[in-house]
Amino acid sequence: MLTLSLLLNILILIPICYLMLTNNVRMVETLGEFNPARGILVAIYMTILIASIGLLIFPDTKFAIALLLMQIVYKLLTPFTVKTLKHPFVISNMLVAIVHIVTVYSLR
C-alpha cells in the first residue's frame, strides 16, 4: 500500500506542478491567476513530490507515515478552507486522503 500511495503522489503531482509552474490555462481556470498563495502551494506540492520520490528510493516507514499523515490532514481540511465540495482539487484531495488513510492503517 505504501508504494501505491507514493506512486499516486508522484503521478498526480508531476503534471500538477508542471501545469502550475507554466501557468497553464487549465490551472488558471481552476486556481486563478498566479499569485503568492499559488506559489506557496506549488512549493508545498513540489516538497511532497520530492519526498515521495525519495521514499520510493530510500524507504523509511516512519518518514512515510509522517508524510502521509500531514497530507491526510491538509486534504481533509480543504473542503473547509475552500468552502465547497465541488472544486476539482477538493474532490481529488478527498479521494487521495482515503487511499492514504488505508495505507497508514496498513502500516501500523
Image (cartoon, rainbow, N blue to C red):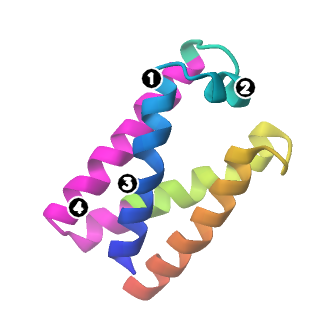
Please tell me whether mark 3 or mark 4 is closer to you in this view.
3
Q: Main secondary structure of the magenta part?
A: helix
Q: Residue furthest left?
A: 58
Q: Earlier in the sequence, mark 1 or mark 2?
A: 1
Quadrant containing the N terminus in the rendered view: bottom left
User: Residue at label 3?
Assistant: 10
Tell me which segment is drawn in magenta. Answer: 37-66
Measured in 3D between alpha carbons, the distance from the residue under mark 1 to the one under mark 3, in whole angstroms, is 16 Å
Pointer 1 and pointer 3: residues touching (CB < 8 Å)?
no
Horizontal and vertical percent position of residue 10? 37, 54
Mark drawn on residue 29: 2
Given contact means CB atoms under 8 Å apart, are the residues at marks 1 and 2 in contact? Answer: no
User: Disc 1 marks which residue?
Assistant: 21
**Lower position in the chain sequence, tag 1 or tag 3:** 3
Observer able to see residue 108: no
Based on the picture, tell me whether residue 92 belongs to the magenta stretch.
no
Mark 2 and mark 4 in contact (Cβ < 8 Å)?
A: no
Looking at marks 3 and 4 on the same chain, the residue that comes earlier in the sequence is marked by 3
Residue 38 located within the stretch drawn in magenta = yes
Front residue (pair 29, 1): 29
Instruction: Give the residue type at disc 3.
Output: Ile
x and y percent of residue 105 in the render?
48, 83
Mark number displayed over residue 55: 4
